[in-house]
Image (spheres, helix red, strand yellow):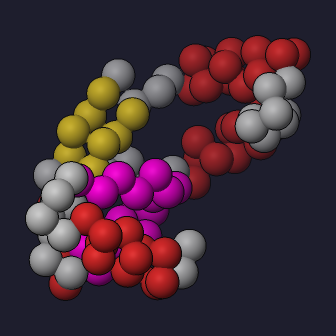
Amino acid sequence: MQGPALDGGVAGSRGRDDVVLDWNQWSRRRRTFWKERANRAGYEALLHHIATPLDAALARSRARSINKPAWAHNLADDDVRHLANIFEAPADDEGLPILTVG
């Protein structure tokens, strides 16, 4: 998502509700980019990290492949393993609050 969508969401939320950016933040670099962007706009970033064991991710992916909901991506086991392998777990030294669930 490019700047105008974020900027519009930020402008529309001034003085009201929180803004949730549901984007893939799999790397430290991506998280830093969006944290800094939110901070420059006058907001504090909070990362919700959903910690999912690999076996659970594989089982959920397989179930989606069987059920085929319209919103789901069809991933093979090797795809799930690849994504798990490149994921960089968030760390306290990234300078943003992290709420871990799971």
Task: Name the image quarter holding the C terminus.
Answer: top left
The span shown in magenta is 18-38
Q: Is residue 56 left or right of residue 96?
A: right
Place of residue 62 in the rendered image (x, y in percent of width and height, measured from the top left):
78, 19
In the image, 15 versus 86, the foreground residue is: 15
- For image coordinates 49% across by 75% down, the residue present is 5
Does any portion of residue 74 appear in the rendered image?
A: yes
Figure check: 68 above or below 70 = above
- For image coordinates 13% across by 77% down, the residue present is 42
Q: Quadrant of residue 57?
A: top right
Task: Name the image quarter holding the N terminus.
Answer: bottom right
Figure check: 21 above or below 10 = above
Q: Quadrant of residue 34?
A: bottom left
Q: Is residue 35 magenta?
A: yes
Q: Is residue 86 magenta?
A: no
Q: Is residue 56 left or right of residue 13?
A: right
Does any portion of residue 35 appear in the rendered image?
A: no
- For image coordinates 46% across by 52% down, the residue present is 22
- For image coordinates 68% across by 16% down, the residue present is 59
Figure check: 66 above or below 77 = above
Query: Number of callouts in the render?
Result: 0
Q: Is residue 10 left or right of residue 92?
A: right
Q: Quadrant of residue 79?
A: top right
Place of residue 27 in the rendered image (x, y in percent of width and height, measured from the top left):
45, 62
